[in-house]
Image (cartoon, helix red, strand yellow):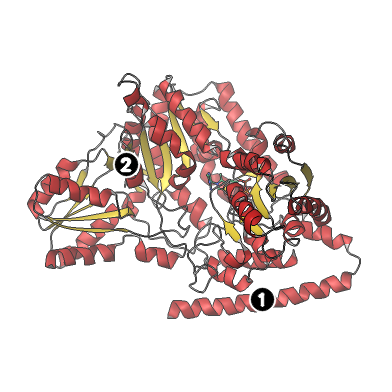
Amino acid sequence: MRTLTFAEAIEDAIAQAMSEDPNIIILGEDVRMLRVNLFSRFGEKRVINTPISESAFLGAGVTAAMAGLRPIVEIMLIDFIGVAIDALLNHAAKTEFFSGNKWKVPMVVRAACGGGYGDGGQHEQALWGWLAHIPGINIVVPSNPSDAGGLMLTAIEHDSPVIFLEHKLLADYWRDYLGSGGRDNLDYNVPPAGEKGEVPDKWLSIPLGSASMIREGTDITIASIGVGVHRALEAAQHLESKDISAEVIDLRSVAPLDTTTVLNSISKTGHLLVVDEDYKHYGLTGELAAIALENLLRLKFGRVSIDQTIPYSHSEEMKIIPGTKQIVASSLKLLKD
Amino acid sequence: MYRSRLFEEQVVQIWNDGLITGEMHTGIGEEAINAGIVTQLVDGDALALDHRGTSPSIIRGVDPKELLLEFMGHCKGLCSGMGGHMHIFSKSHLIASSGIVGASGPAAVGFAIAAQHLRPEKIAVAFFGEGAVNQGMLMESLNFSSVLKLPVLFVCKDSGMAITTQSSQVTAGKLVERAMSFDMPAKELDGTDVEIVWEAANEAIADARSGKGPSFILANCKRTQGHFLGDPLLRIVNEPVKELARITGPLFKSAVSFSGASLKERVRSLKNIASLLGKTAKHRFSGEQDPLLILRKKISEQEEIISIEEEVNKEMKGMVEEVLRMYENNNQG
Ligand SMILES: Cc1ncc(C[n+]2csc(CCOP(=O)(O)OP(=O)(O)O)c2C)c(N)n1
């Protein structure tokens, strides 16, 4: 075991994979500097700086993957996928099906996501639910260094497209680039266990679609992903002081979704609260409710998520991004009603 | 120009004090381009801006107080604290901004179509950086506006850098030729000289107003603040000892790791990084080509200029004091 930051863990896992497989390349804007360590080790043929042409280089990533490479395509922030969505929606996600399952697209899309540092509605979205809506796309969202490295390896090794979302609050360099910019007079309420932690000496992939049960409880199931997991854990501790025993599940992957773990937990607690930094409607929260109903579970359901554009104002955004207080309040309401 | 500079200098101060929480892109160094063009706009003309829209907005006449309050996330800000500096919207000025690189192209085209229908002889101006010219939607906009002969002025502010990427390394061909291939007049000029910009824009704007279609201006400039405040490249250059210490350890460890590229390729990568830093230090952010100093040298009525500057200075200081009071009251209430 060793201790790495969230960002170091991702890079370390990529370095391990790149040293073992010469077909892995990185494509993206500013990657020579953003991934300066990988650039210095693997050279300019494998760490390729692109123009600001997402539709071209993400589209190119799809066929490069089909033709034998394993590209990691970086879309700086997931919000910017808008200009290149066609490559995912109509190509990466469709090739396997159109080819009668004969041709796969082993591509990773790596992007930063999430808010909480005052960057506004075009730079802080989560969007995993929106992307998971498309059949044929896998999406992972790690909440800590150990999962970040493991899931990156999973994403690279997987034979179909995987979107790897890296929450900016957990990645120190993103927080510095887009938030503090070298200032030390700001506090973004960063969850320590997400930012830094123990990781294995050699990375092993984590099976896709496996949630992790991070706190056992009997009264209510709180399922979340990314930074929300840490807020949920904190909320669970508060609830404990009110004699409420909350079970917390880190979903880790939006697609595929580990329904078994969630359903088992609901069978025990009868209450499900989903904490989701993504938009409320037509997303992960509703999906989990539907799955529970489809499986004939009797449950009480609640959700803490975002149902508006994220405000630029930091104090305003903190009112709507799921936080510990809202989770505690929603849990109490769910248990009382 | 001076108003824009002074305003942004106040923004820098407030950002340093932590009262603006996230990133901040200033237009310090670009004022001659913004002023040379925006001062020629009239009511009914539209502005499509990118993430660096503060300076053109100030020059267009947006209230500095409302803008500063916006940047501080205050409910009395221009957009009630909801948009922030990358999303400056002023309906009365027909200003729309976007933090999505390249988006000012289609935005200007739409404004121009509306102008053709609703506001005869009015035009739309798109501002963007040289990094944005490789974004499909911007190229599509050049073509689209040209075939419809729309009243658009495309203004590319060429600082040579897009975040940490030297644009010359990711952009093929000459931009002026690229624009001309869409059958529109295009000109490259010194964007640090407001007179030169004004003259070129004057012609292009007249063409647009009279129905001759779009034009393209490529204006060179230097930005002393880098990409955004706290620019990591600039920090390395300014404080090499402190900043490099953080970076070199992992960098060398990685560069000498077993398995990877050939030694030759690794050396090339390291040289590339060193060259980027060297260029950053030497050219990119030097203050030599400050458009304000250049303008000042040209003007003979020095006394008049000093008194104008003092007046603006006073106005800005008063404005900032008021804003800070409002901010504090808000926090207490
Ligand atoms: C579609 C999209 N891709 C990437 C980014 C991230 N980004 C923000 S500014 C920028 C560089 C823009 O360079 P340029 O257009 O030259 O403008 P400058 O910042 O130099 O004024 C990039 C890559 C973005 N905002 N939108």
User: Residue B46 appears in which quarter of the rendering?
Assistant: bottom right
1 or 2: mark nearer the eye = 2
**Do callouts 1 and 2 point to residues on the same chain?**
no
Q: Which residue is mark 1?
A: B317
Q: Chain of mark 1?
A: B
Residue at 44% x, 50% y is: A172
User: What is the tally of numbered marks visible in this picture?
Assistant: 2
Q: Is mark 1 within 8 Å of ligand 1?
A: no
User: Residue B53 appears in which quarter of the rendering?
Assistant: bottom right
Residue at 74% x, 35% y is: B177
Q: Residues within 10 Å of mark 2 (few under 14, many from 20)?
A: some
Q: Residues within 10 Å of mark 1 (few under 14, many from 20)?
A: some
Q: Quadrant of the C terminus of chain B?
A: bottom left
Q: Is mark 2 within 8 Å of ligand 1?
A: no
**Residue A298 point in image, percent of width and height:** 8, 53
Q: Quadrant of the N terminus of chain B?
A: bottom right
**Residue B4 point in image, percent of width and height:** 69, 64
Looking at the rendered structure, the secondary structure element under dot 1 is: helix
Residue type of the residue flagged with mark 2: Ala
Q: Residue furthest right?
A: B300
Q: A155 or B125: nearer the eye?
A: B125
Q: Chain of mark 2?
A: A
Relative to residue A245, is residue A211 drawn left or right? right
**Residue B289 point in image, percent of width and height:** 78, 52
Residue at 61% x, 60% y is: B95
Residue at 44% x, 64% y is: A314
Residue type of the residue flagged with mark 1: Lys
User: Residue B8 appears in which quarter of the rendering?
Assistant: bottom right
How far is the residue under mark 1 from the one under mark 2?
A: 50 Å
On residue B71, which mark appears? Answer: none
On residue A132, which mark appears? Answer: 2
